[in-house]
Amino acid sequence: MSAVSDDITLWTAKATALASSIAVAVYVAAQREPPPEVTLFLLGGPLIAVILWLQKDARRTGVGAVLDFGLFLWFAWPVIIPWYAWKTRGRAGWRLALGLVALILSASVTGAVVSLLIYGVQLAIWYFETGA
């Protein structure tokens, strides 16, 4: 009999997304390219954490009982997450789906926002220095 692990919670996925977002913001602010291994963790970590939580939740709800739900999620997460949220939560599942997708994309969005802010500040400095 296999025991269900209680170590992957939605809080774990949120913490992973937050840590990844902070690290991406630091790299972008320092205008440095992270090593490939770090990039893989920063962009893939939140996705892996969400997939692990979804696997655990799928065992609890009994939805998505395919042979390898995790691999299926890995390849088709943009389609499977909304389907799973709708199937388990009904009409209120859109909030779960949007929240999970936001966690997955948080590091990328943070990097883009910080990059735009830095560019805007540099543009403003240039504008005022040239007296345009």
Image (cartoon, rainbow, N blue to C red):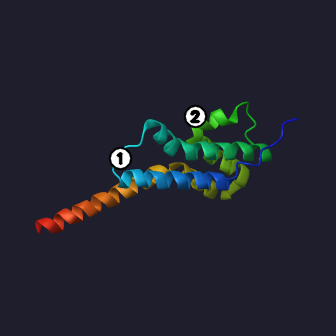
Q: Residue furthest left?
A: 131
Q: Residue at x 57, y 47 (%)?
A: 46
Q: Position of residue 54 (x, y in %)?
A: 68, 45
Q: Residue at x 28, y 63 (%)?
A: 121
Determine whether, in the image, residue 37 is placed left or right of residue 55.
left
**Could you say whether the residue bearing mark 2 is in a helix, strand or loop?**
helix
The kind of residue on which mark 2 rests is: Phe
Callout in the foreground (1, 2): 1
Determine whether, in the image, residue 38 is placed left or right of residue 54.
left
Who comes first in sequence, dot 1 or dot 2? 1
Residue at label 2? 75
Q: Position of residue 131 (x, y in %)?
A: 11, 69
Q: Label 1, label 2: how many angstroms apart (C-alpha)? A: 30 Å
Total marks drawn?
Answer: 2
Q: Position of residue 100 (x, y in %)?
A: 59, 52
Q: Residue furthest right?
A: 1
**Does residue 102 show up?**
no
Sort mark 1 into few (<14), some (14-19) or many (20+) by Cα contacts within 10 Å: few
Residue at label 1? 32
Q: Residue at x 67, y 43 (%)?
A: 52
Q: Residue at x 39, y 53 (%)?
A: 112
The kind of residue on which mark 1 rests is: Arg
**Could you say whether the residue bearing mark 1 is in a helix, strand or loop?**
loop
